[in-house]
Image (cartoon, rainbow, N blue to C red):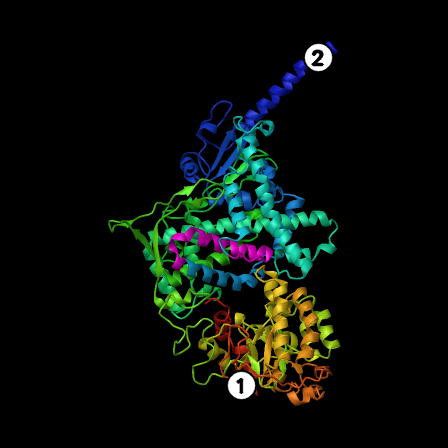
């Protein structure tokens, strides 16, 4: 060693160290104020547990809304006002959008979790995945599912109110799993439901993000779990298999279904369909897998807790509940559930939701941010690398009067309220939650459904006295409300019926024999209201199959339609409006090929079909075949004929895990056997199949030759009903039944607004089928909504719907929305 060099350089190094320390002290003098710190450990001794923003808020009254803390050398900035949080985390998001290194979560296997990952290329890739799926408009596609699941939740709450925690949790998980993976949670015993419960427990026991001892002392990772401070590292290693299973299991489920052609559309399928266009497929698969897991890990738990907070708020504030229910009754009435379309007319429900998120937020300090460079705010120095928290934004008295009080009236316009602004509950700047529109829609629908149907009150003890529940939370990653006791009963008998989305009415006073057929669910098989035509589930022509497909068009449509063209076969297509908008050329081809177009469920689909194909259908099919006289009356007023089915292939269920492909084949075989055995010697049938995915279409193509051999004729439903005018536009025609079976299928529509080039010949069987055989059912005017193989379905020679003039298309308005949501299966 050169001691001379050491002799001369040591004083220089000491001088540099003293200079930098003096400079640091100078900068430290302008740091934000904060409480006195202890030597070495800083503020560790007085730091409050996670989930207690009121402690920092109390300090802010002394030290201001921007405070500086230091714990074992880690610099922390606490922002205790909405103004400061917006100024830094939103307006200066280029500096504050990063995250501190969350060592524990990374050790558990959450390296590709958008909420926790640092700001950079990986973050941008994940953000892009979410933005293509969770925009405000894109989230409208999930509204029917959210309405349906909210109705299921309400029914279960009325039946088992003591199980409120599990029921609300299941609602939150089901919606997110359907969205992320197209996976249907079958119930509380579903294996994935149990796995998710384990995962949530693991996450909530893993300590606060970036704030465990391991984050301060990385060398603890090498210590045994019994070593002081090393517990969380050992816990993370043990928890990793649970996290990996919860991420891998649903993702592998989707990939398997996609390989079989039975996958239900979802976040995963939409992105895996792009797999061939990416540069690094392996990395892309990891991104999609991690992003999908983020949907239900972040969305389910936060939605769950927010709805629990809403329930306890209603227990404690019956006056708020009564005010909301009065608004619902005035706007919606007693005969239906609210829908998202009523949102603008039900502002108080929005106020309740926003107040719930403000009053007791699930993440009172949010996820921590990290500054990536030095900054100065209001003359205060914020060092690079500081961990920044937005603390208890809803406690800001400069914005929220009596901030600790639950009071939705605060958002009312003056003079009724104080016109206070909604809280930014979903984060700031570039870290704002990408799934906020989906989550907010789901919570609004759930709250509206509960208020419309249920009365929530304090429970009574054995002494008959009311029990006031304590609002207490577990201090975990997400604040979860501790169990409470309360009373929940249906507001009225009719409200109980509104909350019954499936099954029968055994729990209410209405019976299947209700004289007006006004409240039956899958019970009202025959219209009882005078002037309503019967539903169509069979066709009048013997040995004839009314052939059609629901839920098209889709991106794999052309190969399937080419097959139908090659077979000289026409069919009836029940098109979904959003699919028509997404694949307009396929819809136009269907009309050009001579297929009949109808609508399933929501009648605003007609507007999309009109825009794309220039025809307006006059036939419709209610989702799940559920129809009663309320819906029939609206449909009839709109000139829509209700088309049901006699045979259900159940092909769409093959992708849900509830029905096997063998069962679908057995359903097709049953139809073929019945046809060969003469079941249809006096009247034909309509089959329910789907243009949903590769599996349903390939299965239809596989069974078509056998159906053609078994039936004498296979024709579109309109042809089977001898309806030559299937659209509002009278200048477009289809062949009559006699024309079709004789091969005279070319109808000159050259003067119409659409061009039909169909020259298909009748799909007559080449076999010598005589049509003889024993009759197993008799003609009837009843129509089964269950889609079973029972006989006794209605038939009709002509279209019984009232004609609709083209001018009516633009004036359906509220009637369209009413019919759409009445028929969505939300009852």
Q: Picture quarter containing residue 323?
A: bottom left
Residue bounds of the magenta highlight: 157-186
Picture disc at residue 6: 2
Q: Classify the position of the N terminus by image quarter.
A: top right
Q: Which residue is mark 1?
A: 800
Picture disc at residue 552: none
- Which numbered mark, 2 or 1, is in the foreground of this view? 1
Q: Position of residue 175 (x, y in %)?
A: 53, 57
Extreme residue in the left direction? 463
Q: Position of residue 639 (x, y in %)?
A: 53, 82
Q: Position of residue 282 (x, y in %)?
A: 71, 48
Residue at x 52%, y 41% (from the top left corner): 202
Indicate the secondary structure of the residue bearing disc 1: loop
- Above/below status of 133 relative to 206: below
Decide: few, some or many residues near mark 1? Use Cα within 10 Å; few <14, some 14-19, many ≥20.
some
Q: 231 or 417, which is in the foreground?
A: 231
Residue 175: say if magenta. Answer: yes
């Amino acid at each position: 060693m050169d001691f001379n060099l050491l002799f001369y350089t040591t004083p220089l190094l000491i001088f540099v160290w003293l200079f930098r320390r003096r400079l640091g002290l100078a900068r430290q003098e302008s740091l934000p104020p904060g409480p006195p710190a202890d030597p070495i450990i800083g503020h560790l001794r007085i730091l409050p547990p996670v989930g207690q923003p009121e402690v920092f808020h109390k300090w802010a009254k002394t030290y201001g809304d921007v405070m500086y803390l230091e714990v074992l050398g880690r610099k922390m900035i606490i922002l205790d006002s909405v103004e400061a949080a917006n100024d830094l985390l939103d307006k200066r998001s280029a500096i504050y959008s990063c995250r501190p290194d969350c060592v524990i979560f990374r050790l558990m296997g959450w390296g590709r979790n958008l909420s926790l990952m640092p700001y950079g290329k990986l973050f941008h890739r994940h953000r892009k995945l979410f933005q293509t799926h969770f925009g405000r408009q894109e989230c409208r596609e999930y509204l029917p599912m959210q309405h349906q699941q909210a109705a299921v939740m309400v029914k279960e709450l009325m039946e088992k109110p003591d199980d409120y925690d599990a029921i609300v949790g299941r609602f939150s998980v089901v919606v997110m799993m359907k969205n992320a993976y197209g996976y249907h949670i079958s119930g509380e015993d579903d294996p994935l439901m149990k796995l998710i419960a384990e995962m949530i427990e693991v996450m909530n026991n893993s300590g606060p993000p970036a704030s465990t001892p391991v984050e301060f002392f990385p060398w603890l990772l090498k210590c045994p779990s019994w070593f002081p401070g090393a517990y969380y590292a050992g816990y993370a290693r043990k928890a990793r298999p649970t996290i990996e299973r919860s991420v891998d299991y649903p993702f592998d489920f989707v990939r398997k279904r996609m390989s079989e052609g039975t996958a239900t559309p979802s976040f995963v399928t939409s992105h895996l369909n792009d797999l061939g266009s990416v540069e690094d497929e392996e990395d892309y698969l990891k991104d999609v897998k991690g992003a999908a897991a983020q949907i239900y890990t972040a969305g389910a738990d936060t939605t769950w807790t927010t709805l629990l907070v809403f329930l306890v708020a209603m227990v404690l504030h019956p006056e708020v509940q009564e005010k909301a229910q009065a608004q619902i009754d005035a706007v919606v009435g007693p005969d239906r559930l609210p829908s998202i379309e009523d949102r603008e007319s039900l502002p108080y429900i929005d106020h309740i939701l926003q107040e719930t998120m403000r009053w007791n937020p699930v993440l009172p300090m949010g996820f921590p941010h990290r500054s990536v460079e030095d900054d100065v705010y209001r003359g205060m120095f914020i060092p690079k690398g500081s961990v920044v928290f937005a603390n208890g934004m809803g406690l800001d008295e400069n914005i929220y009067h009596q901030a600790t009080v639950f009071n939705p009236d605060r958002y009312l316009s003056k003079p009724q309220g104080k016109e206070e602004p909604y809280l930014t509950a979903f984060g700031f700047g570039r870290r704002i939650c990408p799934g906020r529109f989906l989550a907010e829609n789901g919570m609004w629908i759930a709250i509206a459904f509960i208020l419309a149907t249920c009365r929530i009150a304090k429970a009574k003890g054995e002494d008959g006295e009311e029990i006031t529940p304590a609002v207490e939370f577990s201090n975990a990653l997400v604040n979860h409300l501790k169990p409470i006791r309360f009373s929940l009963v249906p507001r009225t008998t009719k409200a109980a019926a509104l909350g019954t989305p499936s099954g029968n009415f055994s729990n209410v006073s209405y019976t299947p024999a209700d004289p007006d057929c006004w409240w039956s669910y899958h019970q009202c098989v025959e219209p009882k209201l005078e002037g309503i035509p019967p539903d169509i589930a069979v066709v009048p022509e013997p040995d004839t199959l009314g052939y059609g497909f629901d839920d098209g068009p889709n991106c794999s449509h052309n190969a399937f339609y080419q097959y139908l063209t090659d077979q000289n076969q026409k069919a009836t297509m029940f098109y979904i409006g959003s699919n028509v908008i997404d694949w307009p050329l396929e819809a136009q081809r269907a009309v050009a090929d001579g297929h009949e177009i109808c609508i399933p469920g929501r009648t605003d689909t007609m507007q999309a079909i009109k825009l794309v194909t220039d025809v307006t259908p006059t036939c419709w099919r209610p989702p799940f075949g559920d129809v009663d006289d309320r819906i029939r009356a609206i449909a009839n007023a709109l000139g829509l004929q209700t088309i049901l089915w006699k045979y259900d292939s159940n092909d769409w269920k093959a992708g849900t895990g509830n029905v096997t492909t063998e069962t679908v084949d057995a359903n097709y075989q049953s139809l073929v056997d019945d046809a060969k055995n003469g079941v249809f010697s006096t009247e034909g049938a309509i089959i329910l199949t789907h243009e949903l995915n590769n599996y349903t279409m390939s299965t239809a193509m596989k069974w078509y030759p056998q159906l053609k051999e078994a039936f004498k004729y296979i024709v579109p439903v309109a042809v089977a009903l001898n309806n030559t005018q299937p659209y509002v536009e009278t200048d477009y025609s289809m062949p009559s039944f006699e024309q079709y079976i004789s091969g005279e299928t070319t109808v000159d529509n050259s003067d119409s607004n659409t061009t039909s080039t169909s020259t298909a010949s009748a799909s007559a069987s080449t076999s010598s089928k005589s049509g003889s055989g024993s009759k197993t059912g008799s003609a009837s005017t009843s129509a089964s909504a269950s889609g079973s193989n029972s006989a006794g379905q209605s038939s009709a020679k002509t279209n019984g719907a009232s004609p609709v003039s083209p001018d009516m298309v633009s004036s359906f308005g509220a009637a369209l929305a009413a019919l759409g949501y009445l028929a969505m299966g939300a009852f």
